[in-house]
Amino acid sequence: MKYIFFLFLLFSSIYAKGLVQPDYTYKISSGLVTDILYNKQKLYCAADDGKIEVFNTKSKKKIQTIRLDKIKDFMGDEIDSKIFSLDMFNGSLLILSQDNGGYSRVHLFDATGLHVIISGSDRLNIIKAKFIDKDNILIALISNDIISYNIKSNKKNWTTQASMSKFSNFALNNDKSLVAIADESGIVHILATKDGAKTKTLRGQNVDNIFSIDFKRHVVLTGGQDRRAGVYNLKNGDAYYKTSKFFVYGVGLSPSGNLAAYSSDINNDVEVFNTNTREILGKYKATKMVVNSIYFINEKEFFINSSSPKVGYYKIK
């Protein structure tokens, strides 16, 4: 029995040494991180208690806190507004959060302050919101209705339903001309953001609900309940999947689409691989909490955002 225990400790130690630890770990003052954004040496960390903490990545110091107004729950009690997602365009920060009555609201934060773009009175159950350009945003509802919305005129440009399945997640490509939409069927639908026209349907690499998705250049990366990280190359038609030992909650692509990362085991450690050669480049130690997203700054640096107060910063060596 002692011999078996010794072997267990030995193999555990070897496995741990193979994991790359974060070069630095950022920690917010309270709550759990729900989404992150990096722009010009600033890391924006959204939290489930209604605030965004901003860190200077050079000094590693917190330089700003953006707070949203509290909302009321179904009992009329004041609660913090959970922030669902962040995006930025030309210095304007787009914030999707929870509002009264179970609906969603969208704020725009810029040099002039915090402005409500869409409120709970619009009665929309928005799951995700991202910029298309400075005047237009793309929003997705739980019904899988995808809406292009003009924030200047407060009017919809177009609305389409990606599929009859429940919406899971979406990701825009680098120039925001296309959006890849994932749902509970395991199928990915590619739409043009200018008019909502469907340009392509991707299937076969996931057979169950897709939790996470990324889209860089001509590469789409998915992570699902079937413990698969799916890769689709829209340029050459290549498609394959990597198998995880646990649900793949978080994925991320480098700006070129040449590198991919996904949560690869029950400890939510992250594996990075080359999407062209499929070669594994390293395995990175995250927190044991569910990975929400993996955010590449460039081809050598990335963040791992888990459902915890911490965000890890990593380098590929």
Image (cartoon, rainbow, N blue to C red):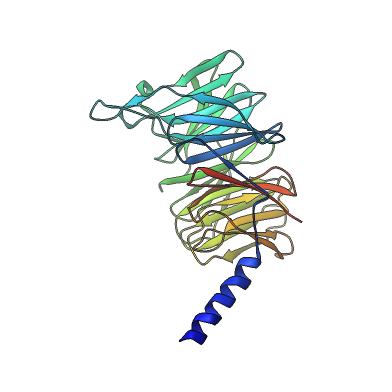
Q: Quadrant of residue 37?
A: top right
User: Residue 276 location in percent, x, y?
Assistant: 73, 60
Q: Along the line of sight, which residue is nearer the eye, 5 or 225?
A: 5
Quadrant of the rendering where the C terminus is positioned: bottom right
User: Residue 123 location in percent, x, y?
Assistant: 35, 26
Quadrant of the rendering where the N terminus is positioned: bottom left
Q: Residue at x 71, y 47 (%)?
A: 301
| Outermost top residue | 112
- Relative vertical location of residue 22 with respect to residue 36 in this rendering, above or below: below
Does any portion of residue 194 appear in the rendered image? no
Does any portion of residue 51 appear in the rendered image? yes
- Relative vertical location of residue 306 with respect to residue 269 in this rendering, above or below: above
Q: How many marks?
A: 0
Q: Residue at x 48, y 20 (%)?
A: 117
- Relative vertical location of residue 113 with respect to residue 251 in this rendering, above or below: above
In the rendered structure, the answer to whether residue 310 lies left or right of residue 277 reads left
Q: Residue at x 54, y 26 (%)?
A: 65
Q: Quadrant of residue 6?
A: bottom right
Q: Along the line of sight, which residue is nearer the eye, 307 or 8?
A: 8
